Image: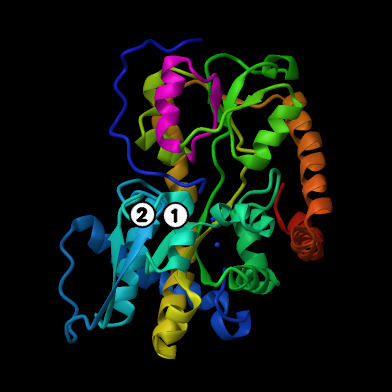
Amino acid sequence: MRTSLGVRPQKRFGSLGEPGDGWSVVRRNFLKPIALAAALLSVTGVAFAQDKAAAAKPVSAPSTSRVIQMQTAFNPALPGSGEGVRVFTRTVKHITAGAFAIKIIEPGRVAPTAEMLDAIVSGDLEAAFTWSGYAASKAPVFNVFATVPFGLGPEDMISWMLEGDGSRIHREAYDKLGVAGIPCGIQGPKGGGWFRGEVNTVADFKGLRLRYGKLAAEVIARLGAVPVLLPPGEFFYKLQQGNVDGGEMSTPAMDAALGFDKLGLPYYLPGWQQPSAVLDFLMRKDKWAALPASLRAQIETACQANIAWMLSRSPNVQGLALEKLKSSGVVVREWSPDMLEAFRKNSDIVVKDLAERDADFAAALANQRAFIAQGAHWRTISRLP
């Protein structure tokens, strides 16, 4: 199947991230019980509702005494991660009674999205809202939080972060880079990908030029495909023009907002390559430490509330987006059992190879898997068939 040329997609936005993550203090000092996050969800919901209406009333408190600038990896106009950026900044303003505010800087304005971590360290950026996968080039351990094929879904990921050692491992990994990294959002599963033809067997994959993230790219290469390194903003046009044969973009909601339904291509699910991804708020360690302890706690609390809000919102938003794609004529296909088995088998090999090369990644992955194994029986026996 080929798309007709000349289709004009919706307006392209800045870098979208490969939708990722880290706690800045030990879990027991930073994370209150999840009940607190649920309670704070009402605060976040109010902030989002006011943002949508663009008519929020001034906070009944003294004028803002401190403003920092934060570049985002996700365009605030987009659903999901983009919304999360707006909700987080509004929650911070509300929770501090207007004494502290975060000004959003659009993707790429000060530094390329993939280089925001360096810009934080150099002092060119005060703060960033991003995906932890961008830090994986400096420390492979961040793959555990960003994307492991056939890894944890968003609920289990957050459980490990809040109740297990995820927050500690994440915080320590960022600390080594000179950055205070606070998990500040969670993205649900991506779509499996858009393709210019049917891909029902491993043989169909051979020779295809496909855009996927790093670990997934290694997986599809093992299946005979050709990974193509392509910035998110270029994928639509390259796919439309036939310069690539397919690959992943993001979640159904983001894909729909970006107009991928106009390409007339089949959409494959599920997104085996990225079941979830943690998003992070970053500041340089010394600048973060210079903030009053009470303000740091308020920002951390706002991040926790943002995670709870995104976790609750995602299933509904993605469900509505999938129906929108279908109503636009998109043919939604499920991967065949043989394809999923091939993806899984080769993902195991790729992840094992990385674990053998990097001790920190291996330790974090083992910790995560051990934590999930503890509750495996409960997950099975507690859920209705």
Disc marking residue 243: none
Q: Residue at x 49, y 60 (%)?
A: 117
Q: Helix or strand or loop: what does disc 2 sit on?
A: helix
Pointer 1 residue:
313
Looking at the image, tell me whether mark 1 or mark 2 is earlier in sequence order. Answer: 2
Q: Residue at x 63, y 52 (%)?
A: 153
Q: Nearer the viewer, residue 44 or 105?
A: 105
Which one is closest to the eye, mark 1 or mark 2? 2
Pointer 2 residue:
83
Q: Is residue 362 above or below residue 325?
A: below
User: Residue 316 vs residue 218: left or right?
Assistant: left
* Labels 1 & 2 near each other (Cβ < 8 A): yes
Q: Nearer the viewer, residue 79 or 326?
A: 79
- Residue 270 visible (yes or no): yes
Instruction: State the image quarter where residue 257 is shown.
Output: top left
Query: Residue 266: where, in percent of width, then height?
Result: 51, 20
Query: Residue 3: where, in percent of width, then height?
Result: 42, 13
Query: Residue 189: where, in percent of width, then height?
Result: 56, 45
Amino acid type, residue under disc 1 in the picture: Arg
Query: Residue 343: where, in percent of width, then height?
Result: 74, 33
Q: Is residue 355 above or below residue 57?
A: above
Crowdedness near tag 2: few (<14), some (14–19) or many (≥20) residues, C-alpha within 10 Å: some
Q: CA distance from mark 1 to mark 2?
A: 10 Å
Q: Is residue 355 above or below residue 184?
A: above
Instruction: State the image quarter where residue 278 is shown.
Output: bottom right
* Range drawn in magenta: 232-251
Q: Residue furthest front?
A: 122
